[in-house]
Amino acid sequence: MREQLGWDRPLKFRRGARQRLRGIELYYDLDWSKHFPDNRAQFRGGKNLAELVIRDCPDGKRPALLLTDRDDVPQGGRQTDVHHVVVINLPQYVTSTEDPGTAQAYLASLLGSGITLAKRFSELTEDEVEQAARWLDEHLDEAALLRWDSNNKQRLELLSRVADAGRPQEDEVEDALGDVERALAALEALESVGPEVAEAIAALATRDDEGEARLELLWALTDDDEGRVIAGELLSARVDERLDDARKAADAFDELLLTSGETAIQHFLEAHPWLLGLDYARVRPRQPVVRGAIDFLLERFDGFHDLLELKSPDDPLFEMVGPKTEIRSPSAFRLSKPLSLALAQVHAYRDILSHETTHAELYGLHNTRDARITILIGRASELTKQEARVLHELNCSLHQVEIVPFDVLARRAHAVLDNVKRYLVTADEQTADDVS
């Protein structure tokens, strides 16, 4: 991160509070204890700021905040290969207005007069258009429009056309009325819930990032023991639907292996981490470490970590020399270049995780010594029987390292779902026998 941003000070890492900072990645070069005496990763107005950064994050990037207290550092958005980073002067942000929750106004003020640099909005880049739109949201009002049209006929006609284009059609009005009726019916149910739940429901109804809003709602609903019990009962009652969802995800992963590359597969695994194994409590994609970033760092339920290196399904595992026959001489076998590089790389990462002492302070990582390693690469379906046996022998000889073809990972996922289904069927039959 530091190298890609060209940052001239060491950066440390924390995960933002799940509710108050949406769990966003936090990088900082300031004295944490000076600005966060309670040591909690949250600050006044931070929730609104984090939501804005998450909303505006480009596809394929991960949103992050970089907090500083230096006045000489330009604030605003920056891009790395992996992250969409917004640099914020923390003291300025929390004291900028009496209501620092208006992150849009604060970020718009960073544009200054830059909004006037382009002759026409059609000349702006896509990112500049988004910045301009946010700036206008905060600064364009009735008085400004009156000054702008200034009895100019062409501008008045333009405003009229915009108004006509924005006016809802009849079917849109009917849909809106239907939404109102449903909302009124839902309000009756709100009388029996607490203020935190009601606030979360209101946020869900008014925000574009529905997934994040639903997560906020779930946190509110499960904030006490009664809510957690009810949620557990509901999830148990919907186990068949959850299994169907998981089956669809496994089928989609099968299809993805035939049509997509490494980046799309990585995003899919980030969204469906259970495919990597059920013994993990948390999956950290593109986890920064000293001198690099790991594709996936997998936290086990015992608090220790495993490492997963992701290559491409199209990468070969072996490279053969000599004539192509069903049974090759041992001298014909070579590890492929992608696999050789991956083996060297993961051992270097394990060395860093085992011997560097700053991961807890910089990234909040504990228990990273002696990580087990998985390398996802290639397809087992493209191996000959001899190559498959050699892969088995290779895995037997490696210490805490396993080379797994992508289609084997997919088969494991289907096998896990089949076993869960058989267990549920057996349990239901046993319950029926006990009742009878």
Image: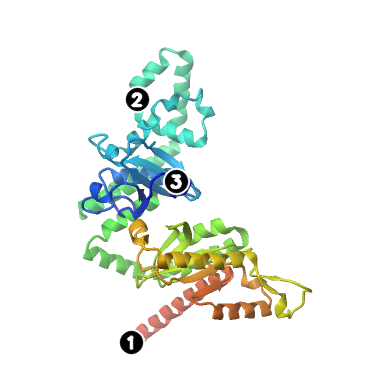
In this view of the protein, which residue sits in the foreground, 174 or 407?
407
Give the residue at mark 3: 84
Measure how far apart labels 1 and 3 are at the Cα level: 57 Å
Single out the mark in the foreground, 3 or 2: 3
> Tag 3, which secondary structure?
strand
Q: Position of residue 258 (x, y in %)?
A: 62, 62
Q: Position of residue 272 (x, y in %)?
A: 46, 63
Tell me which amino acid carries mark 3. Answer: His
Q: Position of residue 212 (x, y in %)?
A: 37, 52
> Tag 1, which secondary structure?
helix
Give the residue at mark 1: 434
The answer to whether residue 28 is left or right of residue 285 is left
Question: In the picture, residue 223 is in which quadrant?
Answer: bottom left
Circles 1 and 2, Cβ within 8 Å, touching? The answer is: no
Single out the mark in the foreground, 1 or 3: 3
Above or below, 65 against 240 in this view is above
